[in-house]
Image (tube, grey):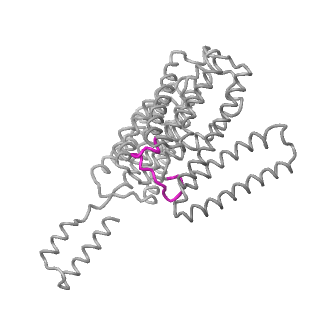
């Protein structure tokens, strides 16, 4: 867009020069003052997607062709066939790197083809030489060897493949009885493009897609990669993680802003908020708090006690990061709307209390009451803060949290209201109150001439 605007300006300057409005010297100074920016190597989603899909089809097709009469080949022939697609992918990769004329489409297809060829080569070599192991044994070296290609091409499709393979590897490693500790090395190794985009305050769709994929991978693998020596530690881990993500989205350097869909342009805020609200309501029930803490530590063959330190390190880093960032944010911004980010304190305190009381019913009742009061308090403060700052979206969020809490605790509580008619009336009353509040606040905010959205 900047180049088009500059081209338009240069056209006007030439027109003014022809009409005698400016002389040649002035026209040259104007052109020098507003030079044409270089053409951006923009990634057209349709072109890149088709290129990546084509590379995937070619890769799978070659694998099927070689598998057709695989048993008839000798070992040296099998080895040569295994390495041929990989060599071809490296040649295409070198060509796409040295020749920039084909832009991102070739880089995307080269990255996809290389990932498939690399995985196929390792799998076929393992089959030829009878290397034991499952999918976790295959994916780990594939991920390590694919990292240089990922950074060299800057491919979004390659990043997607890497993250999916990383999650699959972590799950497979744990299911196979091993551990996924190496996840904490492989994930940060793929994040430099996100760090660069974050520092540049990029709003490119590819940058947002990488953030969303990373958050999704972390949301899955945080629980998978814990060795789970101490039951229930996931409560503190996930509450700290979502709080840290939510607070990072409010930090000025994040430059989060909505795109074509609400929330999509704010991955940190949206993912953190959804995670905090969902987790808070999950913790308001009794089942997450049963048989947790050091009194129930696991020490049988299914759990590797020597890796317990990784769980404690992850917990400490996430909880400490959320506490520090939360304290700084609260002091500087005095943002009552960020009260949900205090969930790690409630979760950690409740975890320690129940662990010390060894799951006594009295302690469980106290924890349930504390979590429900925290949710109610957070919802009310969101309503108050939103009304004070004329942010209708924040008011709606607080009202939604309070309404959902009341419905879950009273209307859908077992044996409380069994009549469908009574529950229907409760729903209608809650919805009517919600709509009435929105109508009143919309008119009030509209008269004040203030913004009515978050």
Measured as percent of width and height from the top left, residue 51 is found at 43, 55
Give the side of residue 2 with respect to residue 143, left or right. Answer: left
Query: 237 or 334, which lies in front?
Result: 334
Q: Would residue 257 be counted in the magenta stretch?
A: yes
Q: How many labels does the image show?
A: 0
Give the side of residue 129 with respect to residue 10, left or right. Answer: right
Question: What's the residue at 67%, 29% (across, down)?
Answer: 288
Measured as percent of width and height from the top left, residue 327 is found at 46, 34
Instruction: Indicate whether 398 appears above or below 447.
Output: above
Query: 207 or 324, which lies in front?
Result: 324
The magenta segment: 248-264
Instruction: Indicate whether 342 appears above or below 450.
Output: above
Prevalent SS, magenta region: loop
Question: What's the residue at 51%, 52% (across, down)?
Answer: 264
Query: 188 or 41, which lies in front?
Result: 188
Res 294 quadrant in image? top right
Q: Would residue 265 be counted in the magenta stretch?
A: no
Query: 147 or 370, which lies in front?
Result: 370
Give the side of residue 425 with respect to residue 81, left or right. Answer: right
Give the side of residue 411 with respect to residue 163, left or right. Answer: right
Instruction: Indicate whether 439 appears above or below 15.
Output: above
Q: Given the current orientation, which residue lies at the most extreme bottom position? A: 19
Measured as percent of width and height from the top left, residue 408 is found at 74, 41
Measured as percent of width and height from the top left, residue 332 is found at 43, 41
Res 448 quadrant in image? bottom right
Question: What's the residue at 28%, 71% (across, down)?
Answer: 7
Q: Name the quadrant of the N terminus.
A: bottom left
């Amino acid at each position: 867009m900047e180049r088009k605007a500059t081209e338009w300006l240069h056209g006007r300057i030439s027109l003014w020069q022809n009409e005698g409005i400016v002389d040649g010297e002035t026209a040259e100074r104007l052109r020098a003052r507003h030079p044409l920016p270089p053409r951006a190597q923009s990634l057209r989603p349709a072109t890149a997607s088709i290129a990546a899909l084509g590379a995937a089809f070619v890769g799978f097709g070659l694998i099927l062709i070689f598998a057709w009469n695989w048993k008839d080949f000798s070992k040296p022939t099998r080895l040569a066939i295994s390495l041929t697609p990989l060599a071809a992918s490296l040649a295409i990769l070198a060509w796409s790197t040295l020749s920039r004329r084909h832009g991102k489409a070739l880089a995307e297809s080269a990255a996809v083809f290389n990932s498939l060829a690399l995985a196929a080569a390792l799998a076929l070599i393992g089959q030829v030489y009878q290397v034991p192991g499952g999918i976790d044994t295959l994916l780990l070296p594939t991920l390590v060897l694919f990292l240089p290609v990922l950074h060299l091409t800057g491919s979004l499709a390659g990043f997607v493949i890497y993250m999916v393979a990383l999650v699959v590897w972590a799950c497979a490693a744990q299911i196979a009885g091993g551990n996924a500790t190496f996840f904490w090395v492989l994930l940060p190794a793929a994040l430099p493009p996100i760090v660069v985009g974050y520092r540049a305050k990029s709003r490119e769709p590819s940058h947002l897609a990488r953030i969303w994929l990373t958050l999704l991978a972390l949301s899955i693998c945080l629980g998978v990669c814990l060795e789970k020596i101490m039951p229930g530690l996931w409560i503190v881990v996930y509450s700290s993680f979502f709080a840290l993500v939510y607070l990072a989205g409010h930090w000025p350097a994040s430059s989060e802003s909505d795109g074509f869909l609400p929330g999509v342009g704010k991955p940190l805020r949206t993912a953190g908020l959804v995670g905090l609200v969902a987790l808070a309501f999950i913790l308001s029930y009794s089942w997450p708090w049963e048989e947790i803490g050091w009194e129930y530590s696991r020490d049988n063959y299914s759990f590797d006690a020597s890796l317990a330190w990784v769980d404690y390190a992850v917990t400490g880093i996430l909880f400490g990061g959320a506490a520090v960032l939360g304290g700084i944010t609260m002091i500087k911004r005095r943002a009552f709307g960020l009260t949900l980010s205090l969930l790690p304190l409630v979760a950690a305190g409740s975890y320690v209390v129940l662990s010390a009381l060894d799951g006594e019913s009295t302690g469980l009742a106290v924890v349930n009451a504390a979590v429900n009061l925290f949710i109610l308090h957070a919802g009310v403060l969101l309503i108050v803060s939103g009304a004070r700052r004329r942010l209708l979206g924040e008011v709606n969020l607080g009202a939604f949290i309070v309404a959902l809490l009341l419905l879950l605790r009273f209307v859908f509580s077992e044996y409380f209201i069994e009549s469908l008619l009574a529950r229907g009336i409760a729903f209608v009353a809650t919805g009517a109150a919600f709509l009435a509040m929105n109508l009143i606040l919309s008119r009030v905010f509209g008269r004040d001439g203030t913004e009515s959205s978050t």
